[in-house]
Amino acid sequence: MTVDVVTIFPAMIAQPLAAGVLGRAIDRGTLDVKVRDLRDFTTDRHRVVDDVPYGGGPGMVLKPEPLFRALDAIEGERGRPLTVVLTSPQGRRFTQAEAQRLSEIEHLVLLCGRYEGIDERVRERVSEEISIGDYVLSGGELPALVILDAVARLVPGVVGDEQSVAEDSFSRGLLDFPQYTRPAEVATGGSAGRAGPAVLKVPDVLMSGNHGDIRRWRKREAVSRTLERRPDLLAGAELDEEEQEILRELKGAKDGRD
Ligand code: SAM
């Protein structure tokens, strides 16, 4: 997958991309990510990318010409078609399903806004606007990284174990089951007056070596967590028969308690 990120703060993108799963995928060439400094597409001595808003009011607005030139340069270098995503609190809400859809696109351009946002006319060259949530950040760099990370881990070959991606929360509309690692027992620590057990154990089933029981336990935990924490997800979840049966049971038990 090829991704171009246009920003006035290239270091904010480049540094996080050097680490972890994405960094390794870039080194291997599975991901081709270029960070473009918007100031490189200015023509004045001071490399100005912003200006005051027409009509007055506070703040500054990203000028259209550098953004248009940046898109022209990317198109010239990479060719069409460009899927240009503008990060914006006014965009469609980003979800795992959106990440899956974008991961199937060969070439994405992510535009990072700043200040009061971009000149409205740039939207002529934008394919879609994406928001990472109903809050306002100071710039599009963190949203671009969030989108890029969530999308890239769905690109085949980026995460070593594709089974782990398939089991992640939201991938089928369920939250992930709880995970434990060694040691089998751990002291809780904290102050002596603390409520709760002093030693925490890993559920016996996970150490039983019985793969059928482990699989069923994990399914039950995933369904029960989703029912408890995010029941809204269940309407669109793709549940197999066993999971549907577990859900009916858990709902029955819950109705009995209410
Ligand atoms: N005045 C704009 C508004 O109210 O819609 C907000 C501008 S914000 C301070 C600057 C930039 O940060 C935006 O252009 C966008 O690129 C990015 N941004 C802020 N919050 C975002 C969010 N929730 N999702 C995606 N991008 C966001």
Image: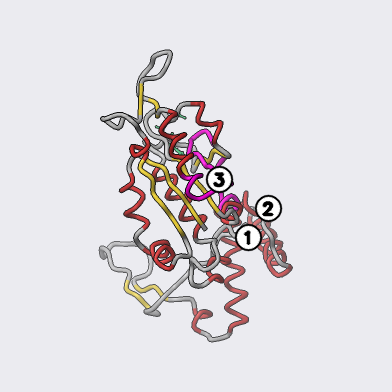
Is tag 3's residue or tag 2's residue first in the polypeptide sequence? 3
Q: Magenta includes 90?
A: yes
Q: Position of residue 232 (x, y in %)?
A: 62, 49
Q: Which residue is mark 2?
A: 236
Q: Position of residue 161 (x, y in %)?
A: 51, 72
3D distance between C-alphas at marks 1 and 3: 29 Å
Q: Magenta includes 129?
A: no
Does label 2 point to a residue whose CB lies under 8 Å from ligand 1?
no
Q: Which residue is mark 1?
A: 172
Residue 204 against residue 222 in the figure, above or below: below
Residue 97 against residue 8 in the figure, above or below: below
Q: Which residue is mark 3?
A: 82
Amino acid of disc 3? Leu
CB within 8 Å, label 3 to label 2:
no
Over which residues does the magenta segment extend? 74-99
Does label 1 point to a residue whose CB lies under 8 Å from ligand 1?
no
Q: Position of residue 41 (x, y in %)?
A: 37, 37
Q: Residue at 49% of width from left, 76% of height from top?
A: 203
CB within 8 Å, label 1 to label 3:
no
Amino acid of disc 2? Gly
- Foreground residue, 211 or 189? 211
- Foreground residue, 101 or 196? 101
Q: Is residue 216 left or right of residue 195?
A: right
Secondary structure beneath dot 1 equals loop
